Amino acid sequence: MTRRAVLTAFGAFGATAALGATAAVPGIAHAGPRSHPVPRSPALRSNGRSVAVLGGGMAGLTAAHELIERGFDVTVYEPTALGGKARSMPSPDTAAGGRLDLPGEHGFRFFPGFYQHIPDTMRRIPFPHNPNGVFDNLVAGPAFRMSVPGGPDLTAPSSIDRLDVYDAESLQRSLAAAFSLGGAIPPHELSVFLRKLTMFLTSSIERRDGEWEHQTWSQTLESDGKSKGYHDILVSALTRQLVAARPDRVSTRTIGIMGQAFVWNAMGIVPAYGHLDRLLSAPTNEAWIDPWAQLLRDRGVRFEMGWAAESFDMSGGKISGVRVVDSSGDRAQVEADWFVAAMPVERAAPLWSREMLDAEPRLGLMHNLVTDWMVGIQYFMRKPTPIAAGHVAYLGTPWALTSISQAQFWRGSFADRYGDGSAVDCLSVDISDWDTPGILYGKPAKECTAEEISRETWAQMKACLDDTGEQNLREEDLVSWFIDPGVRWNAATGRNTNDTPLLINTVGSHADRPDARTSIPNLFLAGDYVRTDIDLATMESANESARAAVGALLEAADSPSPPPAMFTLHEPPELQPLRQIDADRYRSGLPHLLA
């Protein structure tokens, strides 16, 4: 690489850092009608062809898709709703005049350009008038905004060739912010950050796995004693606000891998990558989940809704059945030849019996994995709220907020389609820190009622957006708000519970994550806790893990069908000579050259 290319890479990295059936089961005789399977060619040379997929979230739907295309009989058991945390959901009782309820969601959807498994799946889901199916429902967010209290905000293009996102006024504000943000980080601290980034970029895979995996992001950046700007911009922004990871717990390996993926994407040097910041052109269910479920039904997948896995039975070293229960307490026995456990980690790990753990001891390590909260709130507005032509990061906010103004990216008129016609926009906000006291009530989000969460989140955004006198958010423009119903207030304890926590990567946790293939010959794992190349709890890693599970199942079933396509993140060949030097040093017990 030329000196200029290297400097450009480091600059881009720094800027980025600043910123997820009873037909086959006789035990359920009372289930409702199902779609009839369409004819398919047999895919197996031997063994059985019935598969029970336990969970209908991103991993479960992906597994069902890949299996039904290869001639298996697939039944999906889902206790709540298809799509899991990726789905959208209606805000109850808000529709009028033939419109749909206002669209709520667990959190806004974000599809970085380096996602490759999800786009591949999307292209295979038909959608009216879209040549590339659901994939064509992705639209680009051309800019992002970093908003800080007490100073000008920085608007930046999401790729280096999008300077058209500026007008004269926004360019002036952003230049002022760039200089003020730069001034917020002392030069000697910035040099520490850049040296650490250079070390990671030129580190060998062996050092990443053996050293960086066991250091927290805060430790690597030597954050103790550093300035507030250093903490808010360089330590926290890429962790708390982007991936809901705590900088004092998440491994440098995880954040480094994700950080460099953003850099190569933003620089446009990987032809296979798409636009860095992509969003859906409609609520998630309309644009993606509903068409996907209909495709699978049409191809013969059976969905048994309302049923949750309760326990596994084993016989002869294999899974002989799964006991499922519905919300009324009715129970049934699921029988199949193959089983794909596509439940989230907090629901899967308690189901492993002693017999299962004896057969596959690594399943027990899943109890060491940690979950945290990252939940969204949507504000429905009477006036358009285009705070930015893309995502907004509210730097320094106690609850680590990020947002997106949805209507500017959605097709058609928001007011004509949703609610009672009074709301014209949806400001969707992700709350990534539920444990830090806020500025309005002095309490963490876990200890706030839904009303308090709404007011506190609003106040923290206003502190960032309206600090220069410009009113971006006005109370009189707010129609209503919606929080994921998975977050429920318990007045007796004065705390919330959360049905849908998020797996977070902690130092050393890679060793506790299982592979998609287990030592139990007919059990396979799919979920964002499974080891994947992307190494982060996202829709992409859930999809990738399901493909790995199906590939392992095909091999175990002696199927002649090709395995699902698998992709890896880009590793620049230009840096390979430096990484080879580091590999030699690591094997010799020597530190990195820049240590």
Image: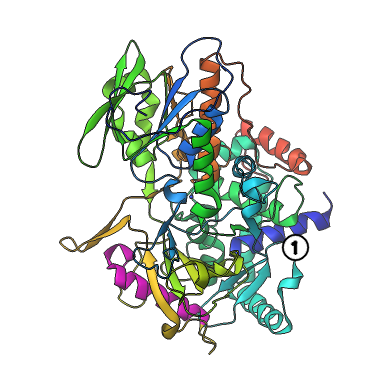
The residue sitting at 32% across, 50% down in the picture is 499
Residue 327 is left or right of residue 99, and the answer is left
Q: Secondary structure at mark 1?
A: loop
Quarter-of-image position of residue 18: bottom right
Stretch of the chain drawn in magenta = 443-465
- Comparing 457 with 280, the one in front is 280
Q: Which residue is mark 1?
A: 160
- Comparing 10 with 438, the one in front is 438
- Comparing 201 with 299, the one in front is 299
Judge whether 376 appears above or below 420 on screen.
above
Q: Tell me how many marks there are.
A: 1
Residue 407 coordinates in the image, percent (x, y) = 56, 69
Judge whether 31 appears above or below 166 on screen.
above
Q: Is residue 395 visible?
A: no
Residue 443 coordinates in the image, percent (x, y) = 30, 70
The residue sitting at 63% across, 61% down in the picture is 16
Residue 26 is left or right of residue 228, and the answer is left
Inspect the magenta stretch and tell me whether residue 239 lies in it. no
The residue sitting at 77% across, 38% down in the picture is 577
Residue 78 coordinates in the image, percent (x, y) = 37, 39
Label 1: how many residues lie within 10 Å, few (<14), some (14-19) or many (20+)?
Answer: few
Type of amino acid under label 1? Ile
Q: Given the current orientation, which residue lies at the most extreme right position?
A: 2
Overall secondary structure of the magenta section: helix
Residue 305 is left or right of residue 409, and the answer is left
The residue sitting at 32% across, 21% down in the picture is 321
Residue 312 coordinates in the image, percent (x, y) = 30, 25
